[in-house]
Amino acid sequence: KTAYEISRSDWSSDVCSSDLFPSHDIHNMKQVIGLGIFLRFLFVFSTPNLSDDWCRFLWDGMMVESGVHPFLYTPREAMEMVSLPSYAVVLLERMNSPDYHTVYPPLSQFVYWLSVRLGAGEIGVSLMVLKLLIIIGELFTMIALGFFLGKVQVGMERVGIVWYAFNPLVILETVGNVHFEGLMVGFLLMCCWALQVGRVRLAAVLWASSVSVKLLPLLVLPVVLVWLGRR
Protein backbone atom coordinates (compact mmCIF):
# COMPACT_ATOMS: atom_id res chain seq x y z
CA LYS A 1 0.00 0.00 0.00
CA THR A 2 1.02 3.57 -0.59
CA ALA A 3 1.25 6.03 2.29
CA TYR A 4 -1.98 7.64 1.06
CA GLU A 5 -3.86 4.32 1.03
CA ILE A 6 -2.65 3.48 4.53
CA SER A 7 -3.60 6.94 5.79
CA ARG A 8 -7.02 6.70 4.16
CA SER A 9 -7.59 3.25 5.64
CA ASP A 10 -6.58 4.44 9.11
CA TRP A 11 -8.90 7.46 8.81
CA SER A 12 -11.82 5.25 7.77
CA SER A 13 -11.39 2.79 10.59
CA ASP A 14 -10.82 5.53 13.19
CA VAL A 15 -13.78 7.65 12.15
CA CYS A 16 -16.23 4.77 11.97
CA SER A 17 -14.98 2.85 14.99
CA SER A 18 -17.43 2.03 17.77
CA ASP A 19 -14.95 3.41 20.31
CA LEU A 20 -15.19 6.89 18.80
CA PHE A 21 -19.00 6.88 18.56
CA PRO A 22 -20.12 4.06 20.82
CA SER A 23 -23.88 4.49 20.73
CA HIS A 24 -26.65 4.76 18.17
CA ASP A 25 -28.90 7.07 20.14
CA ILE A 26 -30.09 10.47 18.96
CA HIS A 27 -27.84 12.36 21.39
CA ASN A 28 -24.78 10.73 19.86
CA MET A 29 -25.93 11.61 16.34
CA LYS A 30 -26.45 15.23 17.36
CA GLN A 31 -22.82 15.32 18.48
CA VAL A 32 -21.66 13.87 15.17
CA ILE A 33 -23.72 16.33 13.12
CA GLY A 34 -22.69 19.24 15.35
CA LEU A 35 -19.01 18.49 14.89
CA GLY A 36 -19.51 18.09 11.14
CA ILE A 37 -21.18 21.50 10.98
CA PHE A 38 -18.39 23.03 13.08
CA LEU A 39 -15.77 21.72 10.62
CA ARG A 40 -17.66 23.41 7.81
CA PHE A 41 -17.77 26.71 9.70
CA LEU A 42 -13.97 26.79 9.54
CA PHE A 43 -14.28 27.64 5.82
CA VAL A 44 -16.85 30.42 6.14
CA PHE A 45 -14.35 33.30 6.16
CA SER A 46 -12.02 31.93 3.46
CA THR A 47 -12.04 32.73 -0.25
CA PRO A 48 -12.13 29.63 -2.49
CA ASN A 49 -8.79 28.91 -4.16
CA LEU A 50 -9.73 25.86 -6.22
CA SER A 51 -12.82 27.23 -7.95
CA ASP A 52 -14.15 30.59 -9.07
CA ASP A 53 -17.71 29.40 -9.67
CA TRP A 54 -18.81 31.53 -6.73
CA CYS A 55 -18.20 34.63 -8.87
CA ARG A 56 -20.82 33.41 -11.32
CA PHE A 57 -23.20 32.62 -8.46
CA LEU A 58 -22.92 36.13 -7.07
CA TRP A 59 -23.18 37.56 -10.59
CA ASP A 60 -26.49 35.79 -11.15
CA GLY A 61 -27.71 36.98 -7.76
CA MET A 62 -26.65 40.50 -8.61
CA MET A 63 -28.58 40.34 -11.89
CA VAL A 64 -31.77 39.30 -10.09
CA GLU A 65 -31.24 41.98 -7.44
CA SER A 66 -30.84 44.54 -10.27
CA GLY A 67 -34.14 43.45 -11.79
CA VAL A 68 -32.58 41.67 -14.78
CA HIS A 69 -33.40 38.07 -15.70
CA PRO A 70 -30.17 36.10 -15.16
CA PHE A 71 -30.76 33.96 -18.28
CA LEU A 72 -31.22 36.94 -20.59
CA TYR A 73 -27.61 38.08 -21.16
CA THR A 74 -24.12 36.70 -20.88
CA PRO A 75 -22.06 38.62 -18.30
CA ARG A 76 -20.11 40.46 -20.97
CA GLU A 77 -23.29 41.45 -22.77
CA ALA A 78 -24.88 42.58 -19.52
CA MET A 79 -21.95 44.90 -18.78
CA GLU A 80 -22.61 46.68 -22.07
CA MET A 81 -26.42 46.72 -22.03
CA VAL A 82 -27.53 46.95 -18.38
CA SER A 83 -26.80 49.34 -15.54
CA LEU A 84 -25.12 47.20 -12.86
CA PRO A 85 -23.47 47.90 -9.48
CA SER A 86 -19.81 48.89 -9.45
CA TYR A 87 -18.66 45.56 -8.02
CA ALA A 88 -19.87 43.83 -11.22
CA VAL A 89 -16.49 44.67 -12.77
CA VAL A 90 -14.68 42.74 -10.03
CA LEU A 91 -16.87 39.68 -10.49
CA LEU A 92 -16.52 39.81 -14.28
CA GLU A 93 -12.72 39.93 -14.08
CA ARG A 94 -12.59 36.85 -11.84
CA MET A 95 -15.24 34.86 -13.72
CA ASN A 96 -14.31 31.92 -15.96
CA SER A 97 -17.48 32.09 -18.07
CA PRO A 98 -18.09 35.73 -19.09
CA ASP A 99 -19.29 34.72 -22.56
CA TYR A 100 -21.76 32.01 -21.57
CA HIS A 101 -25.33 32.14 -20.37
CA THR A 102 -26.01 30.84 -16.89
CA VAL A 103 -27.00 27.18 -16.49
CA TYR A 104 -28.16 27.21 -12.86
CA PRO A 105 -31.79 26.28 -12.03
CA PRO A 106 -34.35 28.38 -10.12
CA LEU A 107 -33.75 27.25 -6.53
CA SER A 108 -30.03 27.90 -6.92
CA GLN A 109 -30.82 31.30 -8.41
CA PHE A 110 -32.93 32.13 -5.37
CA VAL A 111 -30.03 31.27 -3.05
CA TYR A 112 -27.67 33.43 -5.13
CA TRP A 113 -30.08 36.36 -4.98
CA LEU A 114 -30.59 35.95 -1.23
CA SER A 115 -26.82 35.99 -0.69
CA VAL A 116 -26.43 39.21 -2.65
CA ARG A 117 -29.45 40.79 -0.97
CA LEU A 118 -28.19 40.00 2.52
CA GLY A 119 -24.65 40.96 1.52
CA ALA A 120 -25.80 44.51 0.72
CA GLY A 121 -23.41 44.96 -2.20
CA GLU A 122 -20.29 43.67 -0.43
CA ILE A 123 -18.70 40.74 -2.27
CA GLY A 124 -17.02 39.34 0.84
CA VAL A 125 -20.20 39.48 2.89
CA SER A 126 -22.28 37.95 0.08
CA LEU A 127 -19.77 35.11 -0.23
CA MET A 128 -19.94 34.49 3.51
CA VAL A 129 -23.76 34.42 3.40
CA LEU A 130 -23.60 32.00 0.49
CA LYS A 131 -21.41 29.67 2.54
CA LEU A 132 -23.70 29.92 5.55
CA LEU A 133 -26.66 28.94 3.37
CA ILE A 134 -24.66 25.97 2.07
CA ILE A 135 -23.97 24.92 5.67
CA ILE A 136 -27.71 24.98 6.37
CA GLY A 137 -28.10 22.77 3.30
CA GLU A 138 -25.41 20.43 4.64
CA LEU A 139 -27.32 20.07 7.91
CA PHE A 140 -30.41 19.12 5.92
CA THR A 141 -28.41 16.58 3.90
CA MET A 142 -27.03 14.87 7.01
CA ILE A 143 -30.53 14.54 8.42
CA ALA A 144 -31.82 13.28 5.06
CA LEU A 145 -29.05 10.68 4.97
CA GLY A 146 -30.17 9.43 8.38
CA PHE A 147 -33.79 9.11 7.20
CA PHE A 148 -32.78 7.31 4.02
CA LEU A 149 -30.41 4.81 5.64
CA GLY A 150 -32.86 4.23 8.47
CA LYS A 151 -35.32 2.97 5.86
CA VAL A 152 -33.14 1.02 3.44
CA GLN A 153 -30.39 -0.29 5.73
CA VAL A 154 -31.26 -0.11 9.42
CA GLY A 155 -28.22 0.23 11.65
CA MET A 156 -26.08 2.02 9.06
CA GLU A 157 -27.34 5.51 9.89
CA ARG A 158 -24.40 6.27 12.19
CA VAL A 159 -21.71 5.11 9.75
CA GLY A 160 -23.31 6.95 6.83
CA ILE A 161 -23.68 10.23 8.69
CA VAL A 162 -20.14 9.99 10.09
CA TRP A 163 -18.72 9.37 6.63
CA TYR A 164 -20.56 12.37 5.21
CA ALA A 165 -20.06 14.72 8.15
CA PHE A 166 -16.30 14.20 8.37
CA ASN A 167 -15.47 13.52 4.72
CA PRO A 168 -12.78 16.09 3.81
CA LEU A 169 -13.67 16.03 0.11
CA VAL A 170 -17.31 16.81 0.86
CA ILE A 171 -16.37 19.65 3.21
CA LEU A 172 -13.90 21.13 0.72
CA GLU A 173 -16.20 20.89 -2.28
CA THR A 174 -19.35 22.21 -0.60
CA VAL A 175 -18.41 24.97 1.82
CA GLY A 176 -14.75 25.32 0.80
CA ASN A 177 -15.35 25.69 -2.93
CA VAL A 178 -18.98 26.88 -2.66
CA HIS A 179 -20.72 24.10 -4.58
CA PHE A 180 -24.32 22.99 -4.16
CA GLU A 181 -24.10 19.29 -4.93
CA GLY A 182 -24.55 18.54 -1.23
CA LEU A 183 -27.97 20.23 -1.13
CA MET A 184 -28.93 18.47 -4.35
CA VAL A 185 -28.04 15.12 -2.78
CA GLY A 186 -30.05 15.99 0.34
CA PHE A 187 -33.25 16.52 -1.65
CA LEU A 188 -32.51 13.40 -3.68
CA LEU A 189 -32.06 11.27 -0.54
CA MET A 190 -35.32 12.55 0.90
CA CYS A 191 -36.98 11.80 -2.44
CA CYS A 192 -35.75 8.19 -2.25
CA TRP A 193 -36.94 7.95 1.34
CA ALA A 194 -40.38 9.26 0.34
CA LEU A 195 -40.59 6.66 -2.43
CA GLN A 196 -39.68 3.91 0.02
CA VAL A 197 -42.51 4.86 2.38
CA GLY A 198 -45.01 5.25 -0.46
CA ARG A 199 -45.36 9.04 -0.42
CA VAL A 200 -45.11 9.54 -4.17
CA ARG A 201 -46.41 13.13 -4.27
CA LEU A 202 -43.90 14.24 -1.64
CA ALA A 203 -41.19 12.40 -3.59
CA ALA A 204 -42.15 14.36 -6.72
CA VAL A 205 -41.78 17.67 -4.86
CA LEU A 206 -38.41 16.62 -3.43
CA TRP A 207 -37.26 15.43 -6.85
CA ALA A 208 -38.23 18.76 -8.39
CA SER A 209 -36.38 20.55 -5.58
CA SER A 210 -33.25 18.51 -6.27
CA VAL A 211 -33.42 19.33 -9.98
CA SER A 212 -34.02 22.99 -9.09
CA VAL A 213 -30.62 22.99 -7.36
CA LYS A 214 -28.66 21.07 -10.02
CA LEU A 215 -29.82 19.36 -13.21
CA LEU A 216 -27.83 16.16 -12.60
CA PRO A 217 -30.73 14.12 -11.09
CA LEU A 218 -32.45 14.22 -14.49
CA LEU A 219 -29.89 11.64 -15.63
CA VAL A 220 -31.37 8.96 -13.37
CA LEU A 221 -35.02 9.82 -14.00
CA PRO A 222 -35.52 6.82 -16.34
CA VAL A 223 -34.35 4.48 -13.58
CA VAL A 224 -36.85 5.98 -11.13
CA LEU A 225 -39.70 5.69 -13.63
CA VAL A 226 -38.88 2.03 -14.30
CA TRP A 227 -38.76 1.34 -10.55
CA LEU A 228 -42.13 3.02 -10.03
CA GLY A 229 -43.60 1.04 -12.92
CA ARG A 230 -42.54 -2.26 -11.38
CA ARG A 231 -44.19 -1.35 -8.08
Image: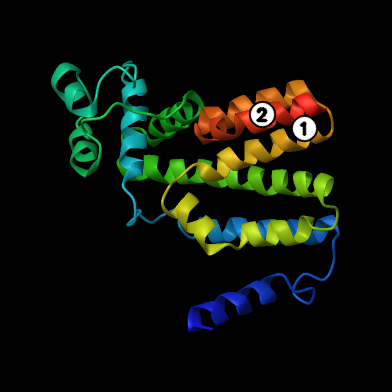
Residue lying at 46% horizontally and 53% vertically, measured from the top left: 173
Q: Quadrant of the C terminus?
A: top right
Q: Which residue is identified by label 1?
A: 194
User: Colour mode?
Assistant: rainbow
User: In this rendering, would 79 be left or right of 6?
Assistant: left
In the rendered view, tell whether residue 94 sits above or below residue 76.
Answer: below
Element assignment for label 2: helix
Amino acid type of the residue tagged 1 in the rendering: Ala
- The residue lying toward the viewer, choosing from 205 and 66, is 205
In the rendered view, tell whether residue 20 sits above or below residue 90.
Answer: below
Element assignment for label 1: helix
Amino acid type of the residue tagged 2 in the rendering: Leu
Label 1 packing within 10 angstroms: few (<14), some (14-19), many (20+): many
Q: Are marks 2 and 1 in contact (CB under 8 Å)?
A: yes
Q: Where is residue 126 drawn, in percent x and y?
A: 38, 39
Q: Where is residue 78 drawn, in percent x and y?
A: 20, 22
User: In this rendering, would 215 be left or right of 64?
Assistant: right
Residue lying at 60% horizontally and 28% vertically, measured from the top left: 209
Q: Where is residue 221 drawn, in percent x and y?
A: 61, 29
In which quadrant of the rendered view does residue 115 lie?
top left
In which quadrant of the rendered view does residue 19 lie?
bottom right
Q: Where is residue 122 drawn, in percent x and y?
A: 31, 39
Q: Quadrant of the N terminus?
A: bottom right
The Cα atoms of the two marked residues, 2 and 1, are separated by: 8 Å
Residue lying at 45% horizontally and 45% vertically, measured from the top left: 179
Residue lying at 52% horizontally and 43% vertically, measured from the top left: 181
Q: Which residue is identified by label 2?
A: 206
